[in-house]
Amino acid sequence: STLYVIATASMGLIVSSFVSTQLAGIVVTAILAIVPALLYSGMLVPVQSMSGDTRLLAHLLPAMFHNRVVVAAFLKNLPLSAVMRDLGVLLLFDVVLLGTGVALTRKREA
């Protein structure tokens, strides 16, 4: 879950580099993180039953991989080795999104 939180917080960091107010940042981040997390994580509709474009979108968001880890760990009681690929993808999301967020963040003069 820590890897997922870092990924979504990094998305917020990227958004904050483009908006000027905190409220706008919160709203845009909620739209970009929460709504797709519900729709494309596989929690409501299995990813396997999605069409081509929506399946691709599900794979481009960290929520699907986090959901797969949670289901494997808590519902199926699978060992850590069964979710290593999904954890690796979440780590890749963290590196790319956090790196992008740090690169886009600039110091604002008061």
Image (tube, rainbow, N blue to C red):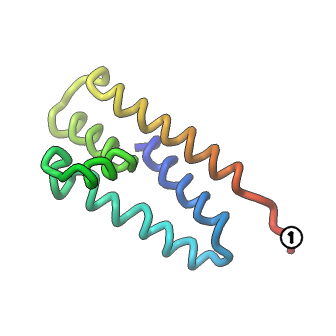
- Find the residue positioned furthest to the right: 109
Residue 54, above or below 108: above
- Amino acid type indicated by mark 1: Glu
In the picture, measured across the screen, residue 49 lies left or right of residue 94, that is left
Residue at which label 1 appears: 109
- For the N terminus, give its image quadrant: top left
Residue 13, above or below 24: above
Residue at 61% from the left image edge and 58% from the top image edge: 13
Residue 12 lies in quadrant: bottom right
Where in the figure is residue 104, as x and y percent of width and height?
Answer: 70, 55
| Crowding at mark 1 (Cα within 10 Å: few <14, some 14-19, many 20+) | few
Residue at 16% from the left image edge and 55% from the top image edge: 45
Residue 17 lies in quadrant: bottom right
In the picture, measured across the screen, residue 50 lies left or right of residue 83, that is left
Residue at 39% from the left image edge and 47% from the top image edge: 60
Where in the figure is residue 89, as x and y percent of width and height?
Answer: 41, 34
Instruction: Report the label total.
Output: 1
In the picture, measured across the screen, residue 97 lies left or right of residue 1, that is right
- Find the residue positioned furthest to the top: 81
- Find the residue positioned furthest to the front: 52
Residue 83, above or below 9: above
Where in the figure is residue 2, as x and y percent of width and height?
Answer: 46, 43
Residue 49, above or below 72: below
- For the C terminus, give its image quadrant: bottom right
